[in-house]
Image (tube, rainbow, N blue to C red):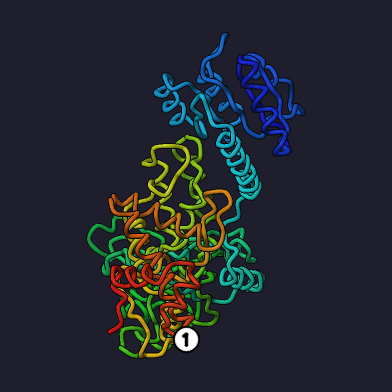
Amino acid sequence: MKPIWIVDDDQSIRFVLEKALQRENLPTRSFTNAQDVLKALSEGPDAEGPQILVSDIRMPGGSGLDLLEKVKEKLPGLPVIIMTAFSDLDSAVSAFQGGAFEYLPKPFDLPKAVELINRAVEESRREEVVEERMVAAPEMLGQAPAMQDVFRAIGRLSQSQVTVLITGESGSGKELVARALHKHSPRANGPFVAINTAAIPKDLLESELFGHERGAFTGAQAMRRGRFEQADGGTLFLDEIGDMPFDLQTRLLRVLSDGSFYRVGGHSAVRAQVRVIAATHQNLEQRVKEGSFREDLFHRLNVIRLRLPALRERREDVPMLTRFFLQQSAKQLGGEPKRITEAALALLGRFDFPGNVRQLENLCHWLTVMAPSQVVEVKDLPPEVLAAQIGAASSTPAAAVEAIASVPAASAPPASAAAQPLVDAGVDAAPEQAAGLAGWEPDLYAEAAAMLAAGRNDVWDALTQRFEGRLIEAALAHTKGRRIEAAQKLGIGRNTITRKIQELGLDET
């Protein structure tokens, strides 16, 4: 591991931090001024830079803010912690907004300082891994089993020119799959032409697809090649094929059958060697039954079908995609990529994303512009994500319902709003925002953070009531409804459990 650089003209501060970090087995290197730090950074490409930089804000010969700016130019991803006296708090906030990982007010509590530095170290390691993965970013990202199935299918089709039908919800990345199929096919050197059949008016779509001759209709002042001709030797991607007008479906079927067509207003057949990949978010079988989609065209397109999973079916990919999109947004805006806490990632992982990957990408653009600091926290997430988290937390998980149902009817306490569970039992990811949290504690942390971010002023009472209610329900279920025994198991008095049952509305009916 690279050392932690400490910059402070106060020898006692350097000494205390060095000793504390040594006890954590963290290597250190100390400097008394900013010039020495910049000199060390310019020693050459083989010089070992810092894992993180901890710098005072006021030093002779150059301030910590100036140092931050120059270090960020050389090492934009390096976490920098600014130490500051209380009177410098405004400057520290400016530094924080300018790219600092965090600021550490003086005088500081040593264990908290070490905790902060450890958190920055973990962040730097995580960012190093992410950067390594992003050096040559693939056209598609996904570690979920459902996405791996898609990747395997693309690999199997790499030497084939067969027609493919891609299905999946809007925003799930169907065009990315089509491009990947083209890129890894024998037609990779030919053109890839995409057209959204739902986005073009019906009276123009025929001309867009097949082209037109001069004078074919009002405004056709010159011959125009259609998308089929443009894609000759390559791949034509027909997006939202389910919305294609019925009469044009007949023409498309003929092209797929013999490879020839007529331009609008033309009299000579045109041939084009084109591989067709179609995509839709609709149920084409149902549209065939309804009579709005030709059955013979459906079978012609449905040679190989690839189904893209919705983002809610591949929640384990949300952290990777979020960090990737944050990096992409930063590149587009010419800024430094924002980091995101594990607690915020956990909440994003619970969000259903009805707009799928496209919605997540737009959300990352929003965070890049709107999040006030370089580290995106739970409170910085969009309102719709926070609102969904609060709504999910108020539903009773099936496991808890079954546990309560197992209590005999004569003694089973009814569930109440005050005793609702803290989290949804189906959540896969848990935040690790605070060191040492395990089990249900990260979920409690995330729930509290979401309620605070939503402006709730009763967080303590609301969560305490739900926590106590769940404990009592579990104990009563374990003891078959015997209150005295349940109180003993919980380590509280029988008067206490009786009072709590009344306060929380857990009285037997």
- Image position of 86 with respect to 155: above or below: above
Q: Position of residue 417 (x, y in %)?
A: 30, 70
- Whether residue 63 can be seen here: yes
Q: Position of residue 140 (x, y in %)?
A: 56, 59
Q: Residue furthest right?
A: 46
Give whichever of 60, 410 is nearer the camera. 410
Q: Which residue lies furthest to the left in this view?
A: 218
Residue 243: name its quadrant: bottom left
Residue at 46% in and 74% down: 167
Give whichever of 9, 441 is nearer the camera. 441
Q: What residue type is labelled 1?
A: His
Residue at 52% in and 51% down: 342
Residue 19: name its quadrant: top right
- Image position of 357 with respect to 364: above or below: below
**Position of the C terminus by quadrant:** bottom left
Residue at 59% in and 27% down: 54
Residue at 45% in and 76% down: 486
- Image position of 398 with respect to 409: above or below: above
- Whether residue 352 can be seen here: no
Q: Position of residue 194 (x, y in %)?
A: 45, 62
Reading the image, the residue beneath label 1 is 299
* Count of number-bearing discs: 1
Element under disc 1: helix
**Position of the N terminus by quadrant:** top right
Q: Position of residue 382 (x, y in %)?
A: 35, 51
Residue 52: name its quadrant: top right
Give whichever of 387, 143 is nearer the camera. 387
Q: In this view, does 159 lie to the left or right of 264?
A: right
Q: Residues within 10 Å of mark 1 (few under 14, many from 20)?
A: few
